[in-house]
Amino acid sequence: MNAKKLLLVVLILGTVVALPFINRTVFGVNSKEVNVSTLSQRVISPSILASGFLAHEEEVMLSSEVIGKVAGLFVEEGDVVEEGDLVLQVDDKNFIAGLEQSEAAVRINTIDIERQIVRIDNLERQFERSKSLYESSLIGEEEYEVARNQRDLSKIDLLSARERLAQANAQLDQVNDNLSKTQVISPIDGVITSLDIKVGETAIASSTNIPGSSLMTIANPASIYTEVLVDEADVANIEVGQRAEIVAIAYPDQPMQGIVRFIANTAKVAPNRQGLSFVVKIDIIDPGEVILRPGMSCRAEIFTRQDQEVTAVPIQAIIFEEDRAELRSDYFIFVNDNGFAKKTKVDVGLSDDEYQELMSEIDENVEVVVGPNQELRHLLEGDRLDATRIDLQ
């Protein structure tokens, strides 16, 4: 009697366990409406995303080298200037006065040298006469020594006068240099991107540990480039010459084409970012219709490998399973096996935003379940499929 009861319990439990599978496989009550597609060859471009901004490669910020009131401003923001153009004039009255004073000092010292030369010639003749008289015993030794000392001292005074003239010339050069600095000249061809001072304001020169007044910024619009920060985990995959696609935040639907030109050798900690980042500079080779302005925020997609045509499926068709206890992770796809879902383990390779490469050898005629995503998430081995075949673009 106990054996019969036990057998009955086992049969009931077996029927309960098998009933869902029988429903799916025989009656099709829980058939899933899915989209399937055959495998296809796709061009996959693996890439790295990074954010940054637009900047000028050739840009100078002008500051004053002398202290003075701004007497003339010859440009406005947005003006185009050429190298050598006068853009600003600092009041030079005091510098001109100093120049006249230094020039006068040079003239005075020049006259003094001429006077010393005449004096030396006179003392030289007097010494020769004294020498002749001394040799003839017509004057004493003391008078002879006085004449010789006066001649020697006059020569020393001439050397001193020449040194004073050299000093006056040096001061004159310094005054001329300071006077030339009252005229601010554009060092490059470019556009005035920022004007930070007005006529009547005082320009302050830089000194030790104290920055001077910022006058204006001039930049070459043809030298604009993109500077992005790449995480240290990705920088090993980036090389100079790789293709990049840049999107300015102000023009989200107008990507620009670029080429990686520079990768920093030293990492830095960027503000508001965790971990280390490397600066990567990208030259813009085709801006399209985008109006480039420095400081614009942008993001860049750097393609780390050349385009390759591989067997691929949509990323949503790949199912990832991880067993942390066994330190194992696997990838699967579902294929249409005569109207039933068959779970198949695969190896994956390259990927982009839409497709994942399949490294496993799979028959090209096999139909892979590619969607919809809400069905794929709950699909099980052996589920009956109501499959609609689609062609992936």
Image: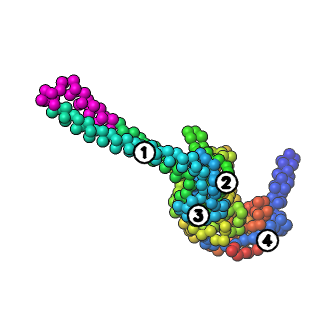
Q: Amino acid at mark 2?
A: Val
Is 40 within the magenta?
no
Mark 2 or 3 closer to N-term?
A: 3
Where does the image place residue 151, in percent across and percent down from the top left?
26, 34
- Mark 4 to mark 1 CA distance (whole Å): 105 Å
Callout 4 secondary element: strand
Q: Nearer the viewer, mark 1 or mark 3?
A: 1
Q: How many numbered marks have been drawn onto this rendered protein structure?
A: 4
Q: Amino acid at mark 1?
A: Val
* Residue corresponding to mark 2: 199
Q: Residue at x 68, y 58 (%)?
A: 297
Q: Nearer the viewer, mark 3 or mark 4?
A: 3
Q: Which of 119/188 is in front?
A: 119
> How many other residues sit within 10 Å of disc 3, few (<14), some (14-19) or many (≥20)?
many
Q: Nearer the viewer, mark 2 or mark 1?
A: 1
Q: Amino acid at mark 4?
A: Asp
